[in-house]
Image (tube, helix red, strand yellow):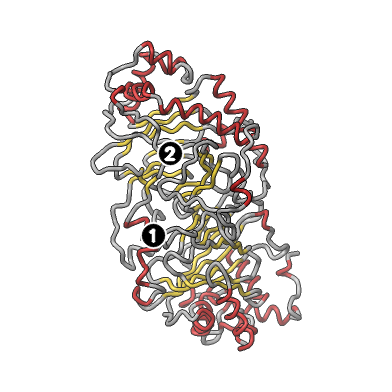
């Protein structure tokens, strides 16, 4: 028997049934009080809640728990289970979502209709306005339900779309047992990155609100400030919630309208993110690459790294034909077997050191800085990307391209971790050094000539290199152009991937259910800001990708794209 079937708050069974019936029928002329707990109308409670809201960090927010009357909460959960939900997935999110629930409040019956009337009521608007001091709110409310099963997530953003003014989330999770941090699914709140331009969130959150049953979290939507995310769900229980927004009368009356350009969506629309990578020591398009074809010396040099089958003229011609037909080519088993095996062993050791386990369903959510040591640094900002990047201990150079690497919230640049000696014998250092050896292949002029033999492109720009590691449940990039992207110019992406080789791994990666794939899609040409164009978050109803390339071990992908093609790593 569920706790929603038990007596609670002193209600007798007969009284409880009457309360549930009232919530389900929506009787009365706006009977919102049938499910809103009475203490939230008490002046002393509101005063305390307002103080908590103002004092909260990284930006003002508060949680009301329990928010609904127990009987009403159970009725809403029961009715919600009967609704159909559609899977939604873009570079930014993955979850199941119902259609807009708000219209149910107009003439509908049942607990969801009553709840919708509550969220659209003057009583609720006055409560939110009093606590947040946000100013005037209209009677418009957007409301939909999301279900986050294992693997679902929502990446960092600030919610600034249209006239949204107050964001609120009602959690309808399992009331039997409190949600645990190890299950993931928490609402992550991000502070501003120290020393970075305004509107840049820190690479990791400073606070996490767990989705406890019958709690309501809320905050004011503010451009470049209200950054938040939903951490990937790792446990067996689904994270179930109702997400809603209250609206301002106009765009000009939203919070900090003058800073609208700092909003996540505006940053992506007005100035699409560009991937900032490290320039090689020697350009792949140097004068030494002007010759056509591969010399015997080139073949000998490249044979130190590349499998013999990809150095034959016939194979290179076959690759070139595939590339011409599809604008991309995928080369499996690209490196020599001995080199690939060394990388595989180093990767397995690093994964084991960090506690990453394959084929383990209830693997706890990892720490944000796991693996960020011994030459590996954490890269952001998280509304554009998050992953580890390797630099050798002797590089001595700082971060390039505003990649927003930063100490943990509350730490200074002089923390003890920044001065720790790098242990070359550590699993992470061995992995970095093995990949650094492959990086030297990409930097060699002979590799540039090899690329020209594979693709019908005449390079005239400098290539860029980066060694990245994407950790499960933490890392990604959002849809972006390359930093060197130029109008009317084609670009070539050359990505060499390595993943674990455990039993069933290939099938899992190919399914794309575990992420890790690289996706290419056409850029959205509609960059006009209006209330109408912003009501659906970027990519929500977009066309499908041009191509998805699943992650695989020792696989090189060559993809040609123009300045209107974006890519991301899921």
The residue depicted at 28 percent of the width and 28 percent of the height is: 457
Which residue is tagged 1? 265
Gap between marks 2 and 1 measured at Cα: 24 Å
Residue 527 in the image, given as x and y percentages of width and height: 29, 58
Judge left or right: residue 206 versus residue 300. Answer: right
Which residue is tagged 2? 548
Residue that protrudes farthest toward the top in the picture = 296
Q: Residues within 10 Å of mark 1 (few under 14, many from 20)?
A: many
The residue depicted at 28 percent of the width and 26 percent of the height is: 456
The residue depicted at 46 percent of the width and 27 percent of the height is: 440
Judge left or right: residue 384 versus residue 52. Answer: left
> Which element type, helix, strand or loop, lies under badge 2?
strand
Instruction: Choose mark 2 or mark 1, whichever is in front.
Output: 1
Q: Is residue 359 visible?
A: no
Marks 2,1: beta carbons within 8 A: no
- 196 shown above or below 29: above
- 359 shown above or below 151: above
197, 156: nearer the viewer:
197
Residue 217 in the image, given as x and y percentages of width and height: 57, 70
Q: Is residue 355 visible?
A: yes
Q: Residues within 10 Å of mark 2 (few under 14, many from 20)?
A: some
> Which element type, helix, strand or loop, lies under badge 1?
helix
The residue depicted at 57 percent of the width and 78 percent of the height is: 25
Residue that protrudes farthest toward the bottom in the picture = 43
Residue 360 in the image, given as x and y percentages of width and height: 67, 41
Numbered marks: total: 2
- 176 shown above or below 90: below
Judge left or right: residue 126 versus residue 239. Answer: left
Q: Quadrant of residue 9?
A: bottom right
Classify the position of the N terminus by image quarter: bottom right
The mark nearer the N terminus, 2 or 1, is 1
Q: Which mark is residue 257?
A: none
């Amino acid at each position: 028997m569920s706790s929603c079937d038990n007596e609670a708050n002193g209600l007798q069974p007969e009284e409880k049934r009457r309360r549930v019936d009232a919530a389900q029928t929506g009787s009365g002329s706006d009977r919102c009080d049938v499910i809103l707990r009475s203490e939230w109308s008490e002046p002393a409670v509101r005063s305390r809640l307002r103080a908590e809201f103002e004092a909260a960090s990284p930006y003002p927010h508060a949680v009301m728990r329990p928010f609904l009357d127990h009987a009403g909460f159970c009725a809403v959960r029961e009715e919600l289970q009967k609704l159909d939900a559609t899977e939604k997935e873009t570079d930014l999110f993955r979850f199941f979502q119902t259609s807009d629930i708000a219209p149910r409040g107009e003439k509908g019956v049942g607990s969801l209709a009553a709840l919708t009337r509550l969220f659209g009521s003057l009583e609720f608007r006055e409560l939110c306005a009093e606590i947040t001091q946000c100013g005037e709110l209209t009677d418009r409310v957007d409301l939909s339900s999301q279900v986050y099963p294992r693997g679902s997530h929502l990446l960092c953003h600030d919610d600034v779309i249209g006239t949204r003014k107050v964001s609120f989330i009602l959690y309808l999770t399992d009331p039997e047992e409190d949600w645990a941090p190890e299950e993931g699914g928490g609402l992550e709140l991000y502070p501003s990155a120290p020393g970075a331009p305004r509107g840049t969130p820190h690479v990791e959150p400073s606070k996490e609100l767990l989705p406890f049953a019958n709690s309501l979290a809320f905050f004011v939507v503010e451009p470049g400030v209200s950054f938040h995310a939903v951490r990937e769900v790792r446990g067996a229980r689904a994270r179930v919630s109702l997400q809603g927004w209250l609206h301002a009368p106009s765009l000009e009356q939203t919070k900090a309208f003058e800073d609208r350009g700092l909003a996540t969506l505006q940053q992506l629309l007005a100035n699409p993110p560009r991937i900032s990578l490290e320039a090689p020591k020697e350009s792949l398009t140097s004068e030494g690459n002007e010759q056509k074809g591969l010399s015997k010396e080139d073949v000998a040099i490249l044979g130190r790294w590349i499998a013999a089958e990809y150095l034959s003229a016939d194979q290179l011609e076959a690759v070139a034909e595939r590339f011409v037909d599809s604008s991309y080519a995928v080369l499996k088993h690209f490196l020599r077997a001995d080199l690939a095996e060394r990388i595989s062993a180093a990767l397995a050791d690093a994964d084991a050191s960090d506690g990453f386990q394959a084929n383990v369903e209830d693997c706890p959510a990892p720490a944000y800085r796991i693996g960020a040591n011994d030459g590996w640094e954490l890269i952001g900002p998280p509304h554009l990307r998050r992953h580890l990047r390797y630099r050798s201990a002797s590089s001595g150079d700082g971060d390039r391209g505003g990649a927003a690497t930063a100490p943990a919230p509350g730490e200074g640049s002089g923390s003890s971790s920044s001065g720790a000696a790098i242990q070359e014998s550590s699993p992470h250092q061995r992995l970095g050094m093995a990949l650094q050896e492959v990086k030297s292949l990409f930097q060699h002029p002979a590799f540039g000539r090899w690329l020209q033999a594979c693709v019908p492109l005449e390079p005239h720009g400098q290539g860029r290199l980066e060694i990245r590691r994407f950790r499960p449940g933490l890392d990604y990039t959002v849809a972006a152009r390359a930093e060197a992207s130029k109008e009317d110019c084609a670009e070539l992406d050359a990505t060499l991937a390595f993943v674990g080789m455990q039993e069933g791994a290939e099938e899992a990666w190919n399914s794309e259910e575990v992420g890790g794939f690289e996706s290419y899609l056409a850029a959205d040409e509609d960059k006009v800001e209006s209330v109408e164009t912003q009501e659906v978050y970027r990519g929500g109803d977009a066309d499908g990708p041009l191509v998805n390339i699943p992650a695989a071990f020792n696989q090189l992908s060559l993809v040609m794209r123009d300045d209107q093609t974006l890519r991301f790593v899921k």
